[in-house]
Amino acid sequence: MSEPASGAVAGIALSKLLPAGLGASIMIAVDMPKTRGELFARFFVAFAFSHLFGDVALGVIQQWIPHATGRAVDGALGALGYFLAGGVAVLAKRFKKQPLVTADKVRRLLKGEP
């Protein structure tokens, strides 16, 4: 890889992936995954979420907060992506153990029933 290309790759990694990883690292302090595979999957979702939606979210947020930075938004979206991946993982484990009970709980939650 040539020097300008490797510099561009490093720039993308520092501007997008590092803040998303920081956001995901904050979420690890709250909810540590049980396996390395689950950790990798959550980090991947955090990076992808930050990379795919970071610029759009920054544009929307800067309409209300003009001084918002891309790194802060990428970090927040990384944490949100990690949180969503964890929620889906927990829901999948519950479906595996008790599918009917879990489906009933999800149905009641979506309808707003206690």
Image: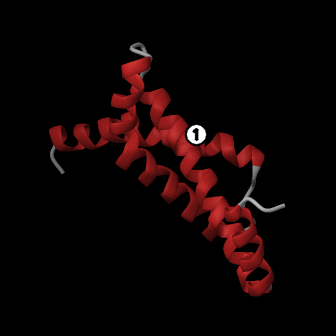
Task: Determine the residue located farthest toward the right in the rendered image.
Answer: 114
Instruction: Tell me the SS state at disc 1.
Output: helix
In front here: 10 or 94?
A: 94
Q: Indicate whether 99 appears above or below 25.
A: below
Rendering coords of residue 52 (x, y %): 36, 49
Quarter of the rendering containing residue 79? top right
**Is 105 on the left or on the right of 74, as rendered?**
right
The residue positioned 36% from the left and 21% from the top of the image is 63
Rendering coords of residue 94 (x, y %): 76, 77
Q: Indicate whether 5 appears above or below 104.
A: above
Rendering coords of residue 42 (x, y %): 58, 59
In front here: 72 or 91?
A: 91
The residue positioned 24% from the left and 37% from the top of the image is 7
Read off the residue under disc 1: 23
**Is 7 on the left or on the right of 51, as rendered?**
left
Rendering coords of residue 100 (x, y %): 76, 86
The residue positioned 18% from the left and 43% from the top of the image is 5
Amino acid at the residue labelled 1: Gly
